[in-house]
Amino acid sequence: VELGLRLKKHETMSTKTVEVARVPTKYPRLPADTPPFTLAQIKQAIPPHCFERSLATSLRYTAQDLVAVAVLYYLSSFLDQLPFVASLALWPVYWFFQGAVMTGLWVIAHECGHRAFCDDENVGDVVGLLLHSALLVPYHSWRISHRKHHQRTNHLLEDEVFIPETRSQHGHVTAWEDIPGPLSVATRVFYCFRMLIFGWPAYLMTHATGRNYGSRTNHFEPASPLFSVKERAQIIISDVVLVGWMAVLAYAGTTIGWAWLIKSYGIPYLIVNLWLVLITHLQHTDVRIPHYRDQEWNWLKGALCTMDRDYGMLNHFHHHIADTHVAHHLFSYMPHYHAEEATEAIKPLLGEYYLQDNVSPGLKGVAEALWNSMTYCRIVEDNEQVCWFKDR
């Protein structure tokens, strides 16, 4: 009863009706005050079986994705035998679907890192190490930094990814709408391209957009400040397996052909990176989502600083990592195959603390969200405890 009264009280608060200045959206900001519920109460709203991890079920999803990758690759072997125009038209179709399926495998490896694959961490680590290495990801290194992201989500100084620039860091900011001619649009298109193509390797190699540790930071050096001394052996294992897979790719390119390798593996790999960066960026970079400094941040407020977003048919290929991301941040050890049910269970309790970007369905909405983030999510102020994105 008390929780119900507190929720009713929050429904009347001004945070529910605050509209985002200058941004063409009818949706309100995420409330920045302390939620009127606890993590335990959210968990109680979810059916207990949603937290059960099944090795058989997880392996089934893994096998389905691997079979799909193999079938798509087999079909691609016939493309160059087709007439030139047909071949030219069908290679992008292969790249799109192969990239989508490989992103699903990436998500399964991500689940291994969260200990959601099965009850046995060692089994999960073996599967995650193999899958992520095949996608040129240092498994343990990323698992550790990603765990820290979940521990400090949207903390302005201590998150591990997509920390916004402050006004003093960025310098003078001119709103895009105040820049005349095609330069405004062209610059934003370039920034989108740069982030989607180079963002992931830049993050792995330099910790770009992540926490500033004051010294060289990357996902490959065991002595990187991302890792503790006891974690260094795992970083070495990740590096060794990754180098081994790169040697296999180099051998394949040398013996079979580099053009074949680029078309069958290289371009789908870039598409995986594109989806990874795009999904992660949009989950935490939005005018409705705040960042916090120390006095305002706590774990639950940070975990709620994300939103669910519809990716159309890609929700299925990506194992619902984007359209159930709120539940994932609250309970990262929950398997993906229970996340949809859990999401529906927690929506009534979360109320205005649940964000869902559904202005336009599917990929049209994703494109709109990316454009809005590039347009309006420029900087935050230097001295605010609750930091909202500004465009000027």
Image (cartoon, grey):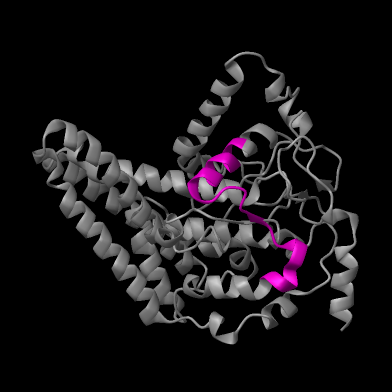
Q: Residue furthest left?
A: 81
In x, y percent, where is residue 309? 57, 55
Q: In the shown orientation, is residue 153 left or right of residue 365?
A: right
Which residue is at 62% across, 59% downward? 148
Region rendered in magenta: 347-371
Which residue is at 32% across, 55% downward? 134
Q: Residue furthest top?
A: 181
In x, y percent, where is residue 384? 86, 43
Name the dominant secondary structure of the magenta segment: helix
Q: Is residue 387 above or below residue 53?
A: above
- Asked whether the viewer can see residue 185, the reply is yes
Q: Nearer the viewer, residue 139 or 15?
A: 15
The quarter holding residue 127 reads bottom left
Tell me, yes or no, whether the highlighted magenta stretch contains residue 356. Answer: yes
The quarter holding residue 118 reads bottom left
Q: In the shown orientation, is residue 18 left or right of residue 140?
A: right
Tell me, yes or no, whether the highlighted magenta stretch contains residue 359. Answer: yes
